[in-house]
């Protein structure tokens, strides 16, 4: 075989490899897992800015929103399953369905949800809520304190943020930690919401800094009730976390910026 033919064969083999690799990535991201990074503090204390997650695609079935770039290839939803209260889910946020949001499911179709002085009630029964130790984390580029009055110094003389923390337990036994920092903030007391058929009522764990189902859907501000049709997947595991101090031109800072204690946390 001539060198020209050998070169053409190698080029063809490389193109085939790229096509196979592309198909593998599409299948992986559409039906198994996809990456997701946390851009805001709305899910603190469970999630912090700079966390990188894998999101499982299979728990709730598959739709166009399972596809990369939401390519409209799947009619409706295939193998649909309803999330459980307490699940941490990723979904396309109303009203535009363009951006991916991550929140915790509080109520499902037919549930009546109300918040009074920060206490959530589901179908007339208050969700169990217990004051626990303050949530504390080191001040970093990704995690500054919300306001200076929450800043303190720990035993190592490092700056930390310290916030009031509570444990909520839903009627199904799902238990998790939340932050409720301010009294009488917007969303601390709401009207009663009846979750429509095929929808979810979702909230951020950082109750005073989350634009969620307590507020009517308005682009860039709040999301209202979320159709289950918008589900992308369920949070699976934290694969990396950074405090934001790394610099690309200084590779050694990539390791010092890693929050290793958060890596591997499952949901």
Image (tube, rainbow, N blue to C red):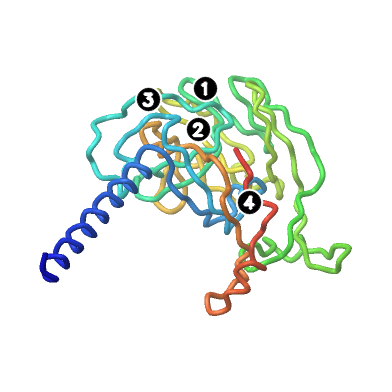
Tag 1, which secondary structure? loop
Q: Are marks 1 and 2 in contact (CB under 8 Å)?
A: yes
Q: Earlier in the sequence, mark 4 or mark 1?
A: 1
Point out residue 171 in the picture as x, y percentages from the top left corner.
65, 21
CA separation, marks 4 and 3? 30 Å
Tag 4, which secondary structure? loop
Determine the residue positioned at 78% across, 34% down: 130
* Residue 237: quarter of image: top right
Determine the residue positioned at 23% across, 41% down: 72
Task: Say which of 63 and 17 sits in front.
Answer: 17
Q: Are marks 4 and 1 in contact (CB under 8 Å)?
A: no
CA separation, marks 1 and 2? 9 Å
CA separation, marks 2 and 3? 18 Å
Task: Between label 4 and label 1, give the one nearer the viewer.
Answer: 4
Task: Between label 1 and label 3, give the one nearer the viewer.
Answer: 3
Determine the residue positioned at 56% across, 39% down: 203
Task: Between label 4 and label 2, give the one nearer the viewer.
Answer: 4
Point out residue 183 in the picture as x, y percentages from the top left corner.
71, 46
CA separation, marks 1 and 3? 20 Å
**Badge number at residue 201:** 2
Tag 3, which secondary structure? loop
């Amino acid at each position: 075989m001539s060198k020209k033919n050998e070169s053409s064969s190698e080029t063809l083999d490389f193109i085939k490899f790229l096509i196979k690799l592309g198909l593998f990535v599409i299948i992986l991201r559409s039906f198994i897992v996809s990456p997701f990074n946390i851009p805001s503090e709305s899910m603190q204390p469970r999630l912090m800015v700079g966390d990188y997650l894998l999101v499982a695609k299979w728990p709730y079935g598959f739709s166009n929103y399972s596809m990369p770039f939401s390519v409209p290839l799947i009619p409706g939803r295939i193998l649909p399953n309803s999330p459980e209260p307490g699940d941490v889910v990723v979904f396309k946020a109303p009203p535009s369905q363009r951006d991916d949001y991550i929140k915790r499911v509080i109520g499902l179709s037919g549930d009546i949800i109300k918040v009074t002085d920060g206490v959530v009630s589901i179908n007339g029964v208050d969700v169990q809520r217990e004051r626990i130790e303050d949530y504390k984390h080191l001040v970093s580029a990704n995690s500054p304190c919300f306001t200076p009055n929450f800043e303190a110094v720990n035993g190592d003389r490092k700056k930390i943020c310290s916030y009031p923390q509570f444990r909520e337990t839903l009627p199904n036994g799902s238990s998790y930690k939340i932050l409720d920092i301010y009294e009488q903030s917007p969303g601390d007391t709401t009207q009663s919401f009846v979750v429509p058929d095929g929808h979810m009522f979702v909230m951020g764990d950082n109750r005073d800094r989350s634009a969620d189902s307590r507020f009517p859907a308005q682009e860039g501000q709040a999301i209202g009730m979320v159709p289950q049709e918008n589900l992308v997947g369920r949070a699976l595991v934290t694969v990396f976390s950074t405090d934001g101090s790394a610099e690309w031109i200084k590779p050694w800072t990539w390791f010092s910026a890693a929050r290793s204690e958060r890596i591997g946390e499952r949901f």
